Image (cartoon, rainbow, N blue to C red):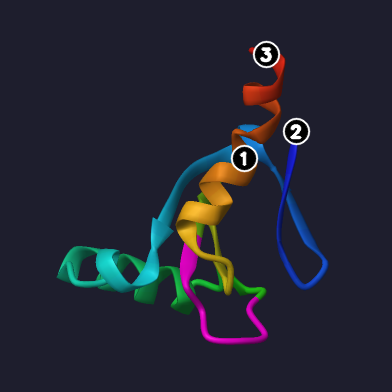
Amino acid sequence: MYLHLGTDTIIRTKDILGIFDLDTSTISKRTRDTLRRAELEGRVINVSSELPKSFIVMAGRRPTIYISQISASTLKKRSGYIDDIKNI
């Protein structure tokens, strides 16, 4: 299954390591340092045309981080939408 992150960006849900709320998770210094390091290494892709609300960590040899204007709770709901339909 795929997940739309905004502005023409779609990712595979099986590659998602985590979906995080930008406001609450960046309180931690460790998270801020990780995001900063990923940005310096060119592994951050900003797909937000508006105020960013979440970031998504993707699996891979060099994990990529997507910044999105869609809230983490909305992305989580979208990512499990098909699974919920299968259980009906």
Q: Is the magenta region chiefly helix, strand or loop?
A: loop
Q: Residue at x 47, y 53 (%)?
A: 73
Q: CA distance from mark 3 to mark 2?
A: 18 Å
Image coordinates for residue 14, horizontal then vertical, percent:
63, 32
Q: Secondary structure at mark 1?
A: helix
Of residue 44 and residue 3, the one placed in the foreground of this image is: 3
Sequence-wise, the earlier of marks 1 and 2 is: 2
To which residue does mark 3 refer?
88
Q: Which residues are magenta?
A: 48-55
Is the C-beta separation of discs 1 and 2 under 8 Å?
Answer: yes
Q: Residue at x 47, y 76 (%)?
A: 39
Q: Residue at x 32, y 73 (%)?
A: 23
Image coordinates for residue 82, horizontal then vertical, percent:
71, 29
To which residue does mark 1 refer?
79
Was residue 61 drawn as part of the magenta stretch in this picture? no
In the image, residue 1 above or below residue 26 = above
In the image, residue 14 above or below residue 5 = above
Of residue 31 and residue 23, the one placed in the foreground of this image is: 23
Amino acid type assigned to the residue bearing label 1 in the image: Ser
Q: Residue at x 17, y 67 (%)?
A: 28
**Disc 3 residue crowd, few under 14, some 14–19, many 20+, Cα 10 Å:** few
Q: If the image is split into quadrants, where does the N terminus sit? A: top right
Amino acid type assigned to the residue bearing label 3 in the image: Ile
Of residue 88 and residue 23, the one placed in the foreground of this image is: 88
* Res. 37 visible in picture: yes
Q: Secondary structure at mark 2?
A: loop
85 to the left or right of 65: right
Is the C-beta separation of discs 1 and 3 under 8 Å?
Answer: no
The label shown at residue 1 is: 2
